[in-house]
């Protein structure tokens, strides 16, 4: 007779079921707590702890695209890559075809919301390093990567406005850190 896997033994035990049930209920309650009306006493007392719990289980959600108050701004990000020989290139967030595989590329849109945020500055340098590494096969090494925020107000009429641009982070690779 083979012994059941640990996960299966936990799921079959009464204690394991109770622990799993409590964890599910806590995650659901934390999800509800993160969407309470801002300014309410319950929101103020639970918001930070609930957000931490939701981030720990990777189930954070944003509902700003829905009424009554959808975001009125389109966001974007690009990286301006300058090479030691003076040439430049602009890196854009990958996009899929307009029809068909949009869900495959949705993660990039969620990522750009985070990587451009002042609250998540910790992501800026690793992002710039990663973008620089995308150009490792170039004859001239990367001299600088500038991360640029793009934003414009949405309008229902006419052509979309041009994006406002703001360089929010500049990364200069350390030549001593280059791979041999």
Image (cartoon, rainbow, N blue to C red):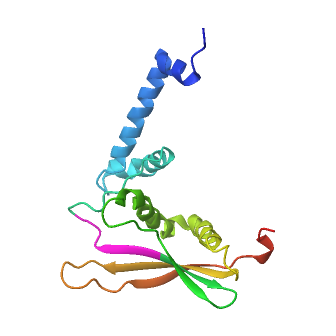
Q: Quadrant of residue 31?
A: top left
Return the residue found at the far top: 1
Decide if residue 180 is on the left or right side of residue 171.
right
Task: Give the quarter of the figure containing the N terminus.
Answer: top right
Q: Is 49 situated above or below 20?
A: below
Q: Is 33 situated above or below 65?
A: above
Magenta-span inclusion, residue 98: no
Q: How many marks?
A: 0
Task: Give the quarter of the figure containing the C terminus.
Answer: bottom right
Quick one: 81 or 120, which is closer to the camera? 81
Q: Quadrant of residue 2?
A: top right
The residue under the point 27% across, 83% down is: 160
Quick one: 39 or 50, which is closer to the camera? 50
The residue under the point 34% across, 47% down is: 42
The region drawn magenta spans 69-77
The residue under the point 58% across, 68% down is: 127
Decide if residue 171 is on the left or right side of residue 55.
right
Residue 13 lies, in percent from the top left, at 49, 16
Quick one: 131 or 45, which is closer to the camera? 131
Q: Is 106 situated above or below 23?
A: below
Quick one: 143 or 38, which is closer to the camera? 143
Residue 163 lies, in percent from the top left, at 37, 83
Return the residue found at the far left: 157
Magenta-span inclusion, residue 74: yes
Q: Quadrant of residue 97?
A: bottom left
């Amino acid at each position: 007779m083979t012994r059941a896997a640990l996960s299966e033994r936990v799921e079959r035990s009464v204690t394991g079921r109770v622990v799993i049930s409590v964890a599910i209920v806590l995650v659901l309650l934390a999800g509800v707590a993160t969407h309470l009306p801002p300014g309410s006493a319950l929101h103020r007392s639970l918001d930070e702890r609930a957000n931490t719990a939701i981030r720990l289980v990777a189930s954070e959600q944003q509902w700003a695209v829905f009424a009554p108050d959808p975001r009125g701004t389109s966001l974007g990000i690009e990286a301006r890559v300058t090479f030691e020989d003076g040439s430049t290139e602009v890196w854009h967030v990958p996009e899929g075809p307009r029809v068909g595989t949009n869900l495959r590329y949705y993660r990039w849109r969620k990522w750009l919301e985070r990587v451009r945020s002042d609250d998540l500055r910790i992501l800026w340098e690793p992002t710039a390093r990663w973008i620089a590494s995308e150009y490792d096969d170039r004859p001239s090494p990367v001299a600088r990567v500038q991360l640029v925020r793009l934003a414009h107000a949405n309008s229902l009429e006419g052509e979309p406005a041009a994006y406002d641009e703001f360089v929010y982070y500049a990364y200069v690779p350390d030549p001593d850190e280059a791979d041999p």
